[in-house]
Structure formats: structure tokens, C-alpha cells
Image (tube, grey):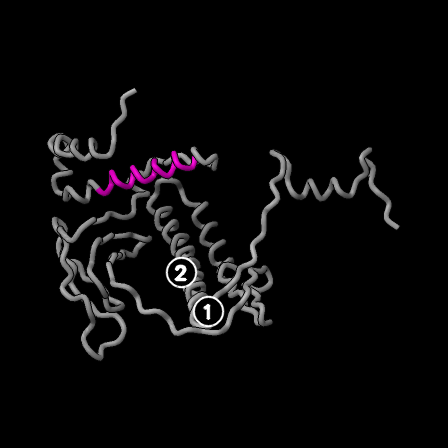
Amino acid sequence: MDTVDYYEQKRELVEIKEVCPEYQEIASHVLQDVILRVKKAYDGFFRRVKKGETPGYPRFVGSTRYRSFTYPDGAGWKLDAHRRPEGKKGMVRVNLKLSNIGTVKLHLHRNMTGTSKTLTIKREGEHWYAVFTCEIGKPEPLPTSYEDVGIDLGVTHFAALSNGEFIDHPRYFRKAEKKLAKAQQALSRKKKGSHRRKKAGQQVAKQHRKIRNQRQDFQHKASRKLINQYQSSCWKTYRRRILPKGQSRNRTKRQESFSPMGQAQKQG
């Protein structure tokens, strides 16, 4: 059985551009990165199969699901400014020039450090983001701390520390549950393929994006606070019980309250 490897697919891009003229407007290294994504997806698939894990076969990503493209090197784009002016706080508007696309206004929310290596243009709902990958030198070590802590993730509280402190759970999903349910109900009532359904889907995605951003912001701030305060941390983990196929946990609990003959056990 003949196989086509990553490098052979890259060489075939020249012929593909001749057959499909619309690809000629896209930089070659951007198209090569798409092939690299496919390679990474299948490498991960075969690795999981080899280890006996759930493989998760790579799915086809259509035009409605493909939300980003990457410049794998410094060619094809140019950023006017990598740092904000001295004394300037908050976001600064700078120009980002993309080949075959044009100049894009970019809100630079912090200074870029190191050497820029890659650039990924990503779309999330109605928003577009420019994600830069930078190579920096060896980071400076944090000040030495003489405190250690044990961390136990819980349900009532987000985490319980060994010194008796608790980190409360913000429960962003619970707070936004009503708005999300209302947006999902509005989406279900719209006709498939209609413009109104597309707009309703954007509202659902907006609610999910807000919840995700709130969770990531909380987790990052909580973890940063722990790292700055403690020298080392220990985590308590749980091993999930694997039930037989087709058997639920509720069924297992019900069976525990019955005798081997199927009769309910008497209490007292």
C-alpha cells in the first residue's frame, strides 16, 4: 500500500497551485503549515493507538470549522511596533501588515519580548486575534520561598490548602447559565441554514467564550498566586473506578441496596 508522507505533500503544492489558481494568492509556507497540522494530528492518532488509548480519529475540518492560519516564520508579515510608548498604559493600536491581505489594525495589549518566531491569525466568533510566538532567553528565577503547601481540588471549594485556607469557586457557568440557556433556545428555534440561525449561533458562542475566558483568567491568577508564595506544592489525585461496559454508577449504587436474590435488604 502506497503512502504519502509530509514532505511529498509539500512538493505537490506546486502542482496544486497550478490546478487551483485561488491558492496562488496564499503564501507557500502558510499552506505548508496546514499540511504540518495534518501530520501532527495523525502522529498523535497513531501514538494513542500504539499505547492502547482511545485513538480519536482525526476529523475533517471544513471551512466553517477552520478558524486559524499560521505564518511559521518571519516572512509574510511585519509589525510596526513591538513595544508600547514609554509611560503608555493599556492597549495601543499598531499596524500589522500581512502579505496578500493588507494592513490590519492591531491592539497591542502588552510589550513583546524576545524574538518573534511565528504568527497565527485566529478567529473566535466575531473577534480576530494575532498570536505571536516569541523566543526569549533564560527567565529569571523567582525569589526563594521557605513555605510548602498541599493542594486538594474539591467541589464545594475550588481548592483546599494544607494550611487551612480555601480558594472559593467563582462558578462562572452557574451565573451565566440562564443567559446561555436562553441563547441556546433561541438557536434551536431558528431554521437551519438561515441567516438568523447563524446570528443566534454567534450569540451562543459569545456566551461560551465569556465563560471560558473568565475561567482561564481565574485559574491563571490563582496558580500565579500560589507559585509566588510557595516553594513547592503537592497535589492530591484520585483514581477513577472503571465500570464494566454498559453499567452506570447509579445502577451500581442501586444494586448495593439489594440482596443477591434481587430482594430489597431490610434496614434496622
| Residue type indicated by callout 2 | Asn
Task: Residue at 11%, 31% (x, y): give it.
Answer: 18
Task: Residue at 31%, 42% (x, y): give it.
Answer: 64
- Image: 195 above or below 126: above
Q: Nearer the viewer, residue 240 or 94?
A: 240
Task: Residue at 69%, 41% (x, y): give it.
Answer: 252
Q: Is residue 42 magenta?
A: yes
Single out the mark in the foreground, 1 or 2. Answer: 1
Question: Which residues, given as a range, are shown in magenta?
Answer: 33-49
| Secondary structure state at the residue bearing disc 1 | loop
Looking at the rendering, which quadrant does residue 152 occupy? bottom right
Q: Which mark is residue 98?
A: none
Main SS of the magenta part reads helix
For the N terminus, give its image quadrant: top left
- Image: 57 above or below 118: above
- Give the mark, 1 or 2, whose residue is nearer the N terminus: 2
- Image: 90 above or below 263: below
- Residue ID for mark 2: 213
Q: Is residue 125 left or right of residue 250?
A: left
- Residue ID for mark 1: 231
Q: Nearer the viewer, residue 183 or 251?
A: 251
Q: Nearer the viewer, residue 236 or 172?
A: 236
The answer to the question of whether label 1 and label 2 lie on touching residues, with beta carbons closer than 8 A, is: no
| Secondary structure state at the residue bearing disc 2 | helix
Q: Is residue 204 left or right of residue 241?
A: left
